Amino acid sequence: MGRLWDISMPLFPGMPCFPGDPVFRSERPHDLARGDAYNVSALGFGSHAGTHVDPPNHFVPHGQPIDQVPLADLNGPCRVLQIPDAVDSVGAADLPPTPPGVTRILLRTRNSARWAARLEFFPDYVALNEGGARELLRRGIRLVGVDALSVERDTSGTFPAHHLLLTASVRIVEGLLLHEVPPGDYELHLAPLRIAGGDGGPARAYLTAP
């Protein structure tokens, strides 16, 4: 297959989670260390834990749930775009150009270096703003991935970027680890959990060279 970059966040007790979301829990009702015949874990976590996909019904009433998002939308050629470290909020002017035909992009910001140093939540993460979201729609982008637990950092409670993108059925992938991935073109491989009616899909995600 050639080189592979795992860009998904591990799930573990104490892992970073968005404020107010359920924390990750893991218990062993059956444990080899206690003399049981096998290991089995009981897991508890939110639908937006770690690396995950936001389906339309996360914000759009009666929107498409995660189990109805076609895998073909989530897998295929993509481009990793480097956002300069000086950028705090990614607007239209901060997005590097994308050639015709590029419909999936992953935004690599200074968040990635912070995740690489320590996997803990930080409130001043770099995210897309409303102007950036509108620019992605103008370019015909159909999937955007970010190296933060949310595609936007909104303090108004209106979440304009989410609404703009999800209403247009643009696929949002959050919680990516991109520190080791140079900007450029890749094949994206992404499979969210098939949760019936789910408002989010924790996922394993990786990149391969095209």
Image (cartoon, rainbow, N blue to C red):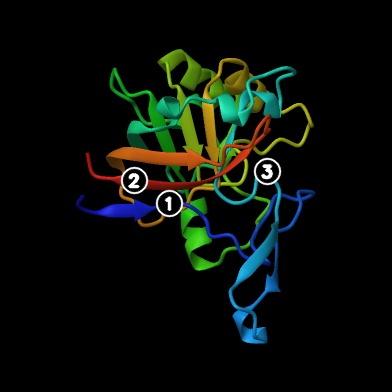
Quarter location, residue 189: top left
Residue beneath the point at 28% across and 46% down? 208
Q: Secondary structure at mark 3?
A: loop
Count residues near mark 1 (Cα–Cα under 10 Å), then give few for <14, some for 14-19, many for 20+. Answer: many
Q: CA distance from mark 2 to mark 3?
A: 23 Å
Q: Amino acid at mark 2?
A: Leu
Residue beneath the point at 68% across and 25% down? 57
Numbered-mark total: 3
Residue identifier under label 2: 207
Q: Earlier in the sequence, mark 2 or mark 1?
A: 1
Q: Are marks 1 and 3 in contact (CB under 8 Å)?
A: no
Residue identifier under label 3: 47
Q: Amino acid at mark 3?
A: Ser
Residue closer to the observer: 3 or 161: 3
Q: Are marks 2 and 1 in contact (CB under 8 Å)?
A: yes
Report the side of 126 relative to 96 (left or right). Answer: right
Q: Earlier in the sequence, mark 2 or mark 3?
A: 3
Residue identifier under label 1: 7
Q: Residue furthest left?
A: 2
Report the side of 9 relative to 57 (left or right). Answer: left
Q: Secondary structure at mark 1?
A: loop
Residue 104 image offset from top left, x and y in percent: 39, 29
Residue 149 has which mark?
A: none
